[in-house]
Image (cartoon, grey):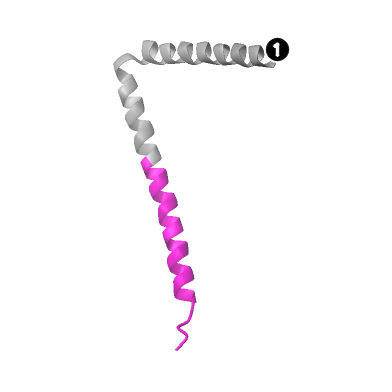
């Protein structure tokens, strides 16, 4: 019974995803590629920001350690 419920839930989620993807392409059309580019640029900028903060933390922790000579 549990397996049947899992398959039913999977089928419902698949139908929802198919409907949402159809809506995305239908309503945006050629502009969908602009949305993809915007998402891609936002993700690159945010990843760059987080990597810079991690690098700054790493450099600060390395400079705080005094040489043991």
Give the overall secondary structure of the magenta segment: helix
Image quarter in which the N terminus is found: top right
Where is 63 relative to 22, above or below? Answer: below
Percent across and percent down for residue 39 are: 38, 32
- Numbered marks: total: 1
Image quarter in which the C terminus is found: bottom left
Q: Which residue is mark 1?
A: 1
User: Residue shown at 49%/75% (left/top)?
Assistant: 64
The magenta segment is 44-69
> Looking at this view, is 9 or 64 the one in front?
9
User: In the shown orientation, is residue 65 left or right of residue 12?
Assistant: left
Q: Residue furthest right?
A: 1
Q: Residue 3, located in which quarter of the rendered image?
A: top right
Percent across and percent down for residue 31 are: 31, 19
Would you say residue 4 sits in the magenta stretch? Answer: no
Percent across and percent down for residue 47 are: 41, 46
């Amino acid at each position: 019974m549990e397996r049947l419920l899992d398959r039913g839930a999977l089928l419902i989620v698949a139908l929802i995803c198919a409907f949402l993807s159809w809506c995305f392409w239908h309503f945006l059309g050629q502009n969908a590629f602009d949305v993809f580019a915007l998402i891609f640029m936002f993700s690159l900028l945010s990843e760059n920001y987080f990597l810079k903060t991690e690098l700054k933390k790493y450099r600060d922790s390395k400079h705080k350690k005094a040489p043991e000579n």
